[in-house]
């Protein structure tokens, strides 16, 4: 018996709802992170009046925390773009189809990683550069 190459319309609707919910959640998290960065009160180490901080370690900690926040925001924005790509694959009929072997990716994987484009076997081979 040949394997099916596409999820049913009901499953695709379910995946779409899940993805839209994830996008909404991530967008709220990113908004909160941005608010935290924008509204961060300058510490003595971030004082614009002084070339040198009160304590260099404080300045380093503040800079590191700010950089970490920006990296988290960038990572979450990238995740949203990948989820939006998954929505496009739902519309085009390619959602849940492995981009390498063209087989249907197991539903369990798509529930856990709705932006997946490869089945676990192909992802592992691709990651390890195995032909």
Image (cartoon, rainbow, N blue to C red):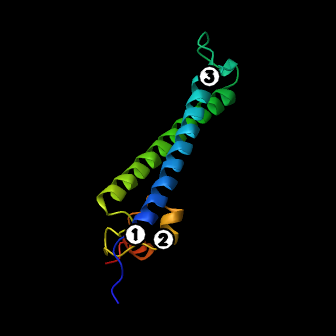
Q: Is residue 77 visible to us here?
A: yes
Picture quarter containing residue 44? top right
Q: Between disc 2 and disc 1, whose residue precedes? A: 1
Residue 115 lies left or right of residue 92; in this view the side is right
> Is 4 rendered above or below residue 74?
below
Quarter placement of the C terminus? bottom left
Q: Residue at x 42, y 72 (%)?
A: 105
Q: Are marks 2 and 1 in contact (CB under 8 Å)?
A: yes
Residue at image mark 2 = 107
Q: Between disc 3 and disc 2, whose residue precedes? A: 3
CA gap between label 1 and label 3 equals: 45 Å
Q: Residue at x 40, y 64 (%)?
A: 9
Residue at image mark 1 = 7
Secondary structure state at the residue bearing disc 2? helix
Quarter placement of the N terminus? bottom left
- In terms of depth relative to the viewer, which is nearer, 63 or 84? 84
Residue 87 lies left or right of residue 73; in this view the side is left
Q: Between disc 1 and disc 3, whose residue precedes? A: 1
Q: Residue 13 appears at what percent x and percent y?
A: 44, 58
- In terms of depth relative to the viewer, which is nearer, 125 or 105? 105
Secondary structure state at the residue bearing disc 1? loop
Q: Are marks 3 and 2 in contact (CB under 8 Å)?
A: no
Residue at image mark 3 = 39
CA gap between label 2 and label 1 equals: 9 Å
């Amino acid at each position: 018996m040949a394997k099916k190459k596409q999820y049913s319309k009901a499953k695709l609707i379910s995946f779409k709802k899940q993805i839209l919910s994830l996008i909404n959640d991530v967008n709220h998290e990113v908004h909160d992170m941005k608010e935290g960065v924008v509204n961060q009160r300058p510490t003595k180490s971030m004082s614009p009046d002084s070339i040198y901080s009160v304590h260099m370690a404080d300045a380093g900690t503040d800079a590191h925390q700010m950089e970490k926040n920006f990296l988290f925001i960038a990572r979450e924005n990238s995740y949203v773009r990948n989820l939006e790509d998954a929505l496009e694959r739902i519309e085009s009929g390619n959602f849940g189809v492995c981009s390498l072997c063209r087989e249907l990716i197991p539903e369990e994987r798509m529930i856990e990683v709705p932006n997946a484009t490869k089945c676990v076997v192909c992802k592992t081979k691709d990651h390890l550069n195995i032909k």
